[in-house]
Image: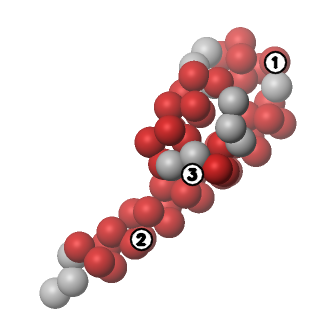
Amino acid sequence: MKRIEEMDLSQRCTAFHDAWSTASKILADRTGFLNQFRVISTALATRMDREERELYQF
């Protein structure tokens, strides 16, 4: 599997969901979950900020 940072955003979201879709998966590796959550949430925030600037200019 590619590292999550190397994937496009939709692949990153899918990989995150697949990796952490149950409480037991999260509880088994809390640090891994938090690290990947930070990566994916930063990527989503960056994407939303860019879309706000580029698509919704008044």
Q: Judging from the image, what secondary structure is the residue with disc 2 in?
A: helix
Q: Residue at x 41, y 71 (%)?
A: 49
Label 1 sits on residue: 28
Sequence-first disc among 1 and 2: 1
Q: Residue at x 64, y 24 (%)?
A: 19
Q: Are marks 1 and 2 in contact (CB under 8 Å)?
A: no
10 Å neighbourhood of mark 1: few (<14), some, or many (≥20)?
A: few
Residue 31 point in image, percent of width and height = 83, 36
Q: Quadrant of residue 58?
A: bottom left
Q: Residue at x 54, y 28 (%)?
A: 17
Residue 49: which disc?
2
Label 3 sits on residue: 41
Q: CA distance from mark 3 to mark 1?
A: 21 Å
Horizontal arrangement in the rendering, residue 49 relative to residue 12 (left or right) = left
- At label 1, which amino acid type do we have? Ala
Number of numbered callouts drawn: 3
Residue 55 vertical position relative to residue 39 in the rendered view, above or below:
below
Q: Judging from the image, what secondary structure is the residue with disc 3 in?
A: helix
Sequence-first disc among 3 and 2: 3
Sequence-first disc among 3 and 1: 1
10 Å neighbourhood of mark 3: few (<14), some, or many (≥20)?
A: few
Residue 18 vertical position relative to residue 2 in the rendered view, above or below:
above
Residue 43 vertical position relative to residue 52 in the rendered view, above or below:
above
Residue 10: which disc?
none
Residue 42 point in image, percent of width and height = 59, 58
Q: Judging from the image, what secondary structure is the residue with disc 1 in?
A: helix
Q: CA distance from mark 3 to mark 2?
A: 12 Å
- At label 2, which amino acid type do we have? Asp
Q: Residue 34 or 14: which is nearer the viewer?
A: 14
